Image: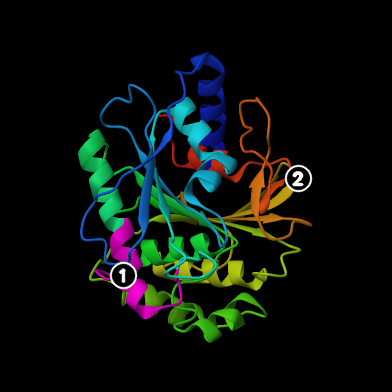
Amino acid sequence: MFRAMALVAALLFTFVGATPAAAAVEPVPSFGSNPGNLKMYRYVPANLPTGRPVVVALHGCTQNATGYGTGSGWTELADRLRFAVVLPEQQSANNFNRCFNWFERGDTTRGQGEAESIAQMVRKTVADTGANASRVHVTGLSAGGAMTAVMLATYPEMFAGGGVVAGIAYRCATTMMDAFSCMNPGKNQSPTALGDAVRAASSHTGPWPTVSIWQGSADYTVRPSNATELAEQWTNVHGIPATPTSTDTVAGYPHAMYAANGRTVVETYTITGMGHGQPLDPGTGATQCGTAGAYLLDVNICAAWHMGSAWNLAG
């Protein structure tokens, strides 16, 4: 199903033609009580109609909202496909390296801290733009990927799907020291324990968000075993085995799909030979996006485009 949507999206890109003039990433000073003390930035394409999707894009450590939003390809895709992008930004007062605090209970519990601040940004954007609240997605890199897992677990009713890039399973760690063990060498928890952590994070009982998991095989910062943990966590939440129902290759990279009732609800992309970063494919082709830089890696596949096509953002 993910591949079929990708083909449809590619055709749409071909026939859309010229895109509207680019907007700009803009700060949003006030968006709620902001218990996590985060900054909010937003990219809203010019003349965006109501009823369009929203994507929340969470930067990695040492990055910022604008740099990640543009470098990852999400803002250019927003212009092409017509959706709004929410770009939360960490402050050094909260974390010296500007990492989202995906390992602190006070920031990863529903209604509290950074998780609630991000949820408030979503509510603000849906209200301001008239977006379709049932078409909100969240994604991020590294600490932003781990925070993506936090948002999917703590606010599952808010997100139709998520994309975790070089991220970590929800509740792998609850302290900073524990976080390093999760990152490398990684932990090995049972699928049931992993799923239970998500089920305990809210009163939600389903339906659950779809999850796209991206991981470099040569990542020594966040070890590839974390992608396995994420797949086990979310297949367990969806009530399906942690065994792929089908596999193929995309741009030469292994791609595994886990389906429930004929619909892919979890997928993994293993980017062979890639280190720690966001997969990009810079260029002007229909499936290309992104600008290479630190932790933004040109590996001939753009994760943002493939997520966007799987989420049918063009529709």
- How many neighbours does mark 1 have within 10 angstroms: few (below 14), some (14-19), or many (20 or more)? many
Residue 253 at x, y percent in the picture? 72, 49
**Nearer to us in this view, 244 or 76:** 76
Q: Quadrant of the C terminus?
A: top left
Dot in front, 2 or 1: 1
**Mark before the other along the chain sequence, 2 or 1:** 1
Secondary structure category for the residue under label 2 = loop
**Nearer to us in this view, 251 or 278:** 278
- Tell me the residue that label 2 is attached to: 252
- Tell me the residue that label 1 is attached to: 113
The CA distance from mark 2 to mark 1 is: 40 Å
Disc number at residue 282? none
Give the amino acid at mark 1.
Answer: Gly
**Nearer to us in this view, 180 or 164:** 180
Q: Residue at x 46, y 19 (%)?
A: 21
Left or right position of 210 against 301: left
Is residue 106 placed above or below 234 in the rendered structure? below
Find residue 229 and report its image quarter: bottom right
Q: Residue furthest right?
A: 273
Left or right position of 105 against 221: left
Secondary structure category for the residue under label 1 = helix
Left or right position of 307 against 33: right
For the magenta stretch, what is the residue range? 101-118
Residue 215 at x, y percent in the picture? 64, 59
Q: Residue at x 43, y 55 (%)?
A: 89
Find residue 250 and report its image quarter: top right
Residue 77 at x, y percent in the picture? 50, 33
Residue 113 at x, y percent in the picture? 31, 70
Is residue 106 within the magenta segment?
yes
Is residue 308 placed above or below 143 in the rendered structure? above
Left or right position of 22 against 221: left
Give the amino acid at mark 2.
Answer: Gly
